[in-house]
Image (cartoon, rainbow, N blue to C red):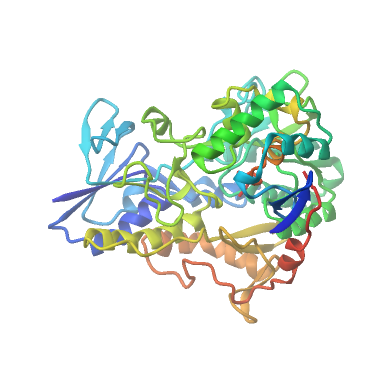
Amino acid sequence: MTVATIADREVHVDGEGFMTEYEEWSEDLATYLATNIGLDLTDAHWRAIRFLREDFKAVGETPTLRRVTAVGGIPTKELFQLFPKKPAKKMAYVAGLPKPVGCV
Amino acid sequence: MKRLLVLGSGTAGTTVVNKLRPRLPRADWEIVVVDGATSHHYQPGYLFIPFGKYEPADIVNPIQKYLPKGVEFRRAEVSRVDPDRSVVVLEGGEELGYDYLVIATGATPRPDQTPGMLGEEWRKSVFDFYTLDGATALAGRLKNWEGGRLVVHITEMPIKCPVAPLEFVFLADSFFEEKGMRDRVELVYVTPLEGAFTKPVAAGRLGGMLDDRQITMEPDFYIESVDNESKSIVSYDEREIPFDLLVTVPVNMGADFIARSGMGNELNFVPVDKGTFVSPTWPNVFAIGDAADLPTSKAGSVAHFAVEVFTENFIQLANDEEMTHRFDGHANCFVESGDGKAMLIDFNYEVQPLPGKYPYPVVGPMSLLEETSINHLGKMGFKWLYWNALLPGRKLPVSALMSMAGKDTSEDLKDTSKDMEVRV
């Protein structure tokens, strides 16, 4: 685990840059993280990010793509448009959550 | 009299009753197993059927042959569980009460969940090999196949035995080579993951093995539908991969009664504590094997190691003691690589597959993350061990928890030292 400075703030991240401390995240940090991976956040992005934040708080793990669709109500197709190529990872990255563990 | 009710008689369910029956006094404990099927399949054997190396009869036996005396077998489908009343309702309405419930109903491939998968081309040019029917049908197709573009595809993780699709392409490469038609076959490996496997060091090695065999990999592919007319698979981000023959691994889900009972996640897997397998909601409910939602592979080896931990804990529970054993997510998988060789991977929740020797340092005799003939013999010999030692609950010469002895950690350290590079 490493400490990184993002938008003048010190945050804990893993080897791939995913934030590891739930409480260190904030909405302005998300905007900065999004820019890092070439995204401009719209309301539609925010809807997904807020779902991820709430779901993580309730369940304790980063939701899978299937869960964001099934429980969060956002169609998978839309998630691929909003977060191209790797939506599960990109959403988690911007929402300041650990990398999804779905793959074992 | 207390009743332990076990749903499912696959690897986990059968092993658990074989281990527990001799240790729970019959005067105090009744053990009942419920399953809708009558035959037990050695599932790792499915892989070899398409290539004519096993026949269906090699891998099927009656369920009851492997259940010990003193365990009641009920052939029935489960309608639902009412965990608040500690009752299982069978199809037809009969109710079975329990003091403790073990859900061991596994994971099932569900081609019905992907639009078009069960279309016109199903079992004509679209096959699965994770079922006996599918593997047998595919054997028939491969026998006379004239060649073309063979696409091997994983729909979504998690799947049972996550290395099996890789083994399938390796064996296919070797099969077509032996038939003298490898130059007429294009092999494509399509995965929703970003590499050949889920963990970095093994993904690197396995990815290299794909390259060596001229197998093309298409990563990050999340299927939306199968187009039966154009014979292609289409992703959510509108990539299309055409095929002459598609061998797909459909999405894997837990049993439907788990959803009807409100006990599962989106894929009907049961959330449980990853060390003890106890449900966080109902303290007398456990889920073991593939049915459990755990951050480790869905595999027979995991079920086997998990059952060893579960058994010790359950005996403590039966004696009104605290459960002190904790599972570490140990998985151990042979990866058949063709030409009479295999590699072996050994890992757990925390430690990824690393190179080295297994089960003993230096002398092995198995080699981790390396293709050897001895590993292949281990894989082939495992079928006998499965029926004669593992299922009957006998002790195998490997420990339930993972050991670091014999593992080379240098690549692991190298991997985690990459800091701050955004690789999303």
Q: Residue at x 53, y 39 (%)?
A: A57
Q: Is there any visible trace of residue B233 in the rendered image?
A: no
Name of the residue lying farthest toward the bottom: B363
Looking at this rendering, what residue extends furthest in the right direction? Answer: B183
Residue B242 vs B73, above or below: the answer is above
Quadrant in which the N terminus of chain A is drawn: bottom right
Is B63 on the left or on the right of B88, as rendered? Answer: right
Is residue A64 at least partly visible in the picture?
A: yes
Q: Is residue B23 left or right of residue B292?
A: left
Nearer to the camera, B241 or A20: A20
**Left or right: A87 with respect to B290?**
right
Task: List x then y, in percent, for residue B67.
Answer: 31, 53
Q: Residue B49 location, x and y as percent?
A: 60, 46
Horizontal placement of B23 versus A39: left or right?
left
Q: Report x, y in % for residue A24.
A: 65, 46
Q: Position of residue B377 (x, y in %)?
A: 61, 67
Q: Name the residue at 65% across, 19% down.
A: B120
Residue B183 quadrant: top right
Task: Please name the residue shown 23% across and 59% down the image.
Answer: B318
Task: Name the residue nearer the viewer: B105 or B243.
Answer: B105
The vertical placement of B181 against B248, above or below, is below
Q: Nearer the viewer, residue B392 or B84?
A: B84
Q: Quadrant of residue A32?
A: top right
Residue shown at 84% from the left, 34% from the top? A38
Tally the marks. 0
